[in-house]
Amino acid sequence: MVKQLLFATNNSHKLREVQEIIGTSFILLSLKDVSIEGDIPETSDTLEGNARQKARHIYEKTGTDCFADDTGLFIDALDGRPGVYSARYAGEGCSFEDNIRKVLAEMMDAENRNASFRCMVCLILAGKEHLFEGRIDGIILKEKHGTEGFGYDPVFVPNGQSQTFSEMPPYLKNGLSHRGRAILKMMRFLVQ
Ligand code: IMP
C-alpha cells in the first residue's frame, strides 16, 4: 500500500519538487489537504530552528507524522545574506523578482560570486524529531536565465554546471539541489 506523508508547506512549487524527488513510494499531503491555512510560525534565526519549529507546530496541530523544510541562499560577498531571511529579503510581501533584484544590486561590483543553497529538513515520527541537511555550492550570475523553478533559481548556477537551476529540466535540478539531497537522506532513513 502507498503510504501518505504530510509535508508542512503550502508552496506548490516545493510540493511538486519534493513529490518528484520522493517518487511513488509516498504520496505527499500538503497543509491544504489537512485544511491548515495561513503562515506557520518561523521565528528562529537558524534553518534548523525554523524547520523544527514548523514541523513541531504542524505535528501538535494534527497529531500526524510530518516533515518541514527551511532553506536559505548564503552568498559569500554579502557575508552570508540573505541566508535564513531568503524568503523576505526585499521586505514583507516581496516577490521572488524583488529578492533577485536586491541581491543583484548588492552584488553589482562583487567579483566573488560564490554562494550556497542550504536546506534543513525536520521529520517528526511518533513525536521524535529527525534532522537531514542538504547543500549545493555554486555561483550567482549577473542577470537572470531560464524560466523553470522558483526563488533565486534564475541566477544560481551549481558548480560543475553551465545552466542555472531555472534552465534545467526538473529532474536535473532535483538530482543536484540542496532540497533533493536533504530529502534523499530522509527517504533513505524512512525505508531502512
Ligand atoms: P523556504 O524556507 O524553503 O521557504 O525557502 C526560503 C526562500 O529561499 C524561498 O522563498 C526562496 O526565495 C528561496 N529558495 C528556497 N528553495 C529554493 C530553491 O530550490 N531555488 C531557489 N530559491 C529557493
Image (spheres, helix red, strand yellow):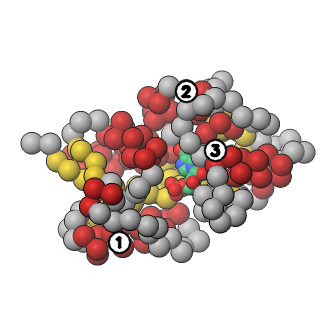
Q: Give the mark nearer the N terminus: 1 vs 3.
A: 1
Q: Please indicate, yes or no, whether residue 130 appears anywhere in the rendered image.
A: no
Report, in whole angstroms, how far the alpha carbon at label 1 lies from the one at label 3. Answer: 27 Å
Q: Mark 3 sits on what residue?
A: 152
Q: What amino acid does circle 2 point to?
A: Met
Element assignment for label 1: helix
Q: Which mark is residue 168?
A: 2
Measured along the vertical axis of the image, is residue 98 above or below residue 24? below
Give residue 175's position: percent from left, percent from top.
Answer: 45, 33
Q: What amino acid type should be assigned to the residue bearing mark 1?
A: Arg
**Residue 72 in the figure: left or right of residue 91:** left
> Which residue is found at the position 61% from the left and 39% from the top?
153
* Label 3 secondary element: loop
Dot 3 beta carbon under 8 Å from ligand 1: yes
Left of 1 or right of it: where is 104?
right
Q: Residue at x 33, y 50 (%)?
A: 186
Spatial CA span between label 2 and label 1: 34 Å
Of residues 154 and 175, the one drawn nearer to the viewer in this rendering: 154
What residue lies at 20% left-to-right and 50% top-to-bottom?
4
Indicate which disc, 3 or 2, sits on the residue closer to the N terminus: 3
**Residue 19 in the image, given as x and y percentages of width and height:** 34, 41
Give me the C-alpha separation between circle 3 and circle 2: 14 Å
Callout 2 environment at 10 Å: few (<14), some (14 to 19), or many (20+)?
A: many
Q: Which mark is residue 164?
A: none
Are the residues flagged by discs 3 and 2 in contact, CB closer than 8 Å? Answer: no
Residue 62 seen in the current view: yes
Q: Which residue is labeled 1 in the image?
A: 56
